[in-house]
Image: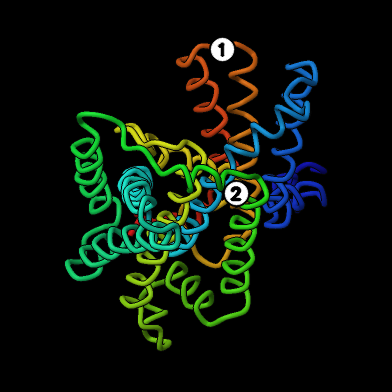
């Protein structure tokens, strides 16, 4: 009889903590530490040698800028698959305009990205099409534009823009983007409206949020950030080929989910998802390369890690179809 009500006992304190939002919020940081320690051990410390760290950081800057824009889109509960093709087209514009003026090249890249974001936002909002459908279509469209423009040869950038390639400049741009985006997300109505739409679009509309306007502007802003990232990409690579930005959308999505961003968006997202996730992906990717794994094996391992983190961090109570 003593065990009659065994199943009715309340969970232990540890069980409650492991199921809490607090623990789920800590998971990405724990995951980052595990990956850092594991990669340090498996590469015998080589991954954190000064030269390697510099190489690793050079692969973080523009993906982190792009991820910042996608973070806002995913907070809405939407998704965007055009980052790679947007980066490719914007990088071509930046390279071409760099022969006339560096400020003009930067502006051209930002406006190109914003225009592509506006196209995505327009079809998503105006025609009530789900974001993943719209952005898959435009992904192929602008990947085709990028391939067409680079068919005969790679498009070079001017020597003046390549001379800007310095860690200090790339760090300054990345930090500026993160700080401004963090402020907007945490302390302004813009951030509150975005989280409200992600939590429930109908409720947000009844509370006075102009949901269509918010969604459209978020897609435009995300595109503009990808256009800025194109400038950072150009000063790094120097010339643009048809493969520019290839698979970037997959990298960004995986990075944000590894960082703990709920794919359903809403109020539970954390700005730290951007930084933690991008660092985690980059360290994991570089570690696997240094360990000598073939591309297929790398994809397999990253896929397993991705699935584990989705399973651990997804909010099943809020699960819904992506908008």
170 vs 219, left or right, is right
**Residue behind mark 1:** 293
97 vs 236, left or right, is left
Q: Earlier in the sequence, mark 1 or mark 2?
A: 2
**Residue behind mark 2:** 260
Which of 316/300 is in front? 300
Res. 182 visible in picture: yes
Count of marks placed on residues:
2
289 to 148, vertically: above or below: above
Which of 44/26 is in front? 44
The span from disc 1 to disc 2 (Cα, nearest Å) is: 26 Å
* Residue 220 found in image quarter: bottom left
Kindly identify the residue that appears in the image at 41 percent across and 79 percent down.
203
269 to 89, vertically: above or below: below
Kindly identify the residue that appears in the image at 53 percent across and 74 percent down.
191
Q: Position of residue 202 (x, y in %)?
A: 35, 76
Q: Position of residue 123 (x, y in %)?
A: 20, 63
Crowd class of label 1 (few under 14; some 14 to 19; many from 20; radius 10 Å): few
308 vs 15, left or right, is left
Kindly identify the residue that appears in the image at 45 percent across and 55 percent down.
70
For label 1, the SS is: loop
Q: Position of residue 141 (x, y in %)?
A: 19, 45
* Disc ID at residue 102: none
For label 2, the SS is: loop
Of labels 1 and 2, the one closer to you = 1
């Amino acid at each position: 009889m003593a065990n009659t009500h065994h199943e009715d006992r309340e969970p232990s304190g540890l069980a409650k903590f492991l199921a809490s939002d607090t623990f789920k919020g800590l998971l990405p940081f724990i995951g980052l530490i595990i990956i850092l320690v594991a990669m340090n051990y498996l590469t015998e410390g080589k991954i954190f040698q000064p030269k390697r760290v510099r190489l690793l950081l050079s692969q973080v800057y523009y993906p982190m800028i792009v991820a910042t824009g996608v973070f806002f889109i995913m907070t809405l509960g939407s998704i965007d698959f055009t980052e790679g093709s947007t980066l490719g087209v914007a990088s071509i514009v930046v390279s071409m305009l760099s022969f006339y003026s560096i400020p003009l090249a930067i502006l051209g890249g930002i406006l190109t990205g914003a225009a592509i974001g506006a196209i995505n936002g327009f079809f998503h909002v105006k025609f009530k099409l789900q974001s993943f459908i719209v952005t898959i279509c435009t992904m192929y469209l602008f990947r085709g534009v990028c391939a067409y423009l680079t068919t005969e040869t790679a498009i070079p950038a001017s020597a003046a823009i390549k001379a800007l390639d310095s860690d200090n400049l790339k760090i300054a741009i990345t930090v500026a983007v993160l700080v401004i985006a963090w402020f907007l997300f945490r302390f302004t109505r813009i951030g509150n409206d975005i989280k409200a739409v992600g939590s429930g679009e109908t409720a947000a509309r009844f509370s006075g949020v102009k949901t269509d306007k918010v969604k459209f502007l978020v897609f435009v802003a995300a595109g503009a950030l990808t256009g800025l990232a194109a400038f950072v990409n150009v000063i790094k690579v120097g010339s643009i080929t048809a493969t520019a930005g290839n698979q970037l959308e997959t990298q960004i999505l995986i990075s944000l989910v590894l960082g703990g961003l709920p794919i359903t968006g809403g109020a539970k997202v954390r700005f730290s998802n951007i930084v933690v996730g991008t660092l985690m992906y980059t360290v994991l990717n570089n570690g696997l390369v240094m360990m000598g794994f073939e591309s297929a094996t790398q994809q397999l391992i990253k896929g397993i890690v991705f699935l584990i983190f989705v399973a651990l961090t997804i909010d099943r109570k809020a699960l819904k179809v992506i908008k």
